[in-house]
Amino acid sequence: MTDIKLERQENQSGDPEIATQGFGCISSKPLPVFNPVADLDAACEYFESNGFVVLEDCLNVAELTRLNEFFDRTQKEVPEKWGHGKRKPHHRNQGLIFSQPLLDYPELDDYICHPRSYPLVCRLLGGEDSVRFSELNLREVPEDAGIGSMDFHHDAVSDDRFLRAPYNPVDWLCRIHYLTDTVPGTPAFCVVPGSNRFETLKEARQSQGDDYQEVPIYGKAGTCILYDTATFHTRFDGDGRQKRRSWHQYFARGGWLKSSLPTTSRYVRSPSPALTDWNLFPERLVFHSDPKVRLLFSHWNTAQGEWVASGFSDEVRKSMPRGEQ
Ligand SMILES: [Fe+2]
């Protein structure tokens, strides 16, 4: 989810040194880190209060090796899919991105519902039957990439988020796994805790007062971050020299939520809309023999609908903006 419904924030600080990186209220306090199995309840509670949560050890050494090998291999075999040599226009200063690796690499299927983090993903979206897949991409900030300067922003949001009660479950959930160690000096995912309850970053700053914080999240390879896409975040730049690899995956909330209040309407929340108008799901997942997998991949956008109607034609896929990536 790199460029749709992305609302960029103006520099509110007036300080050119922190022009695109918020108000400069960088927190150095360590964040709580949860074991996703032993601390499932606490992790869920923390997410619902803060709009994000950090989970430890979500990939083992063998998985990290395989995923890093996937980066190495595909960057060599299909460099154009990563944007090597030619920076893709939609990537701006975000380094290398492999936008739709699931289309051609079934070897990644086993990671989609990774057993370490997936139980919490299910819980946060209202149960396993309510989880829908939206997008999976792989990213790398290469060595000596320089400073990218990403603005604080939120990803997709729904208009009813300030009106509904309760606020949770969220509309979309993003899951980031660090595939390389992330320490001060490497680019880091950076979040403003609790900012999902505000329309703008400025409002969060004014309302939270001294509690307002911009928190770069550091952690070793295998660390996982879940965040509500309405939470303000950015990539906090490091020294511009060190490499960082990460795997980003988005989930949506599916199903109709019934009202628990005596309202005129029986249903109060419809399934979340498609996250992008371009992301495609491959045939093997859309028409999987397991109905649970088909449900997970059931949130189609119009591009997907047209691709399915064409019988998953290569020509139709290639005609789409990121069809070859
Ligand atoms: Fe984002």
Image (cartoon, rainbow, N blue to C red):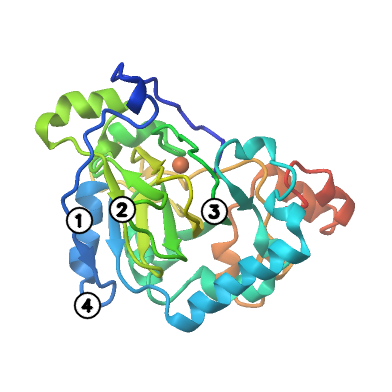
Residue visible at 39% across and 20% down in the picture: 10
User: Which is more foreground, mark 1 or mark 3?
Assistant: 3
Q: Tag 1 or tag 4, which sits nearer the N-term?
A: 1
Q: Quadrant of residue 45?
A: bottom left
Query: What label does residue 38 carry, if any?
Result: 4
What whole-number distance in Å separates the C-alpha atoms at marks 3 and 2?
Answer: 20 Å
Residue highlighted by disc 2: 217
What whole-number distance in Å separates the C-alpha atoms at marks 4 and 3?
Answer: 36 Å
Across and down, in percent, residue 270 comes to: 45, 44
Residue visible at 32% across and 64% down in the picture: 123
Query: What label does residue 143 carry, if any?
Result: 3
Can residue 161 be seen in the rendering of this structure? yes
In terms of secondary structure, where does tag 4 sit?
loop
Across and down, in percent, residue 164 comes to: 29, 37
Q: Are marks 2 and 1 in contact (CB under 8 Å)?
A: yes
| Vertical relation: 144 (above or below) 16 | below
User: Which is more foreground, mark 3 or mark 2?
Assistant: 3
Q: Residue furthest left?
A: 210
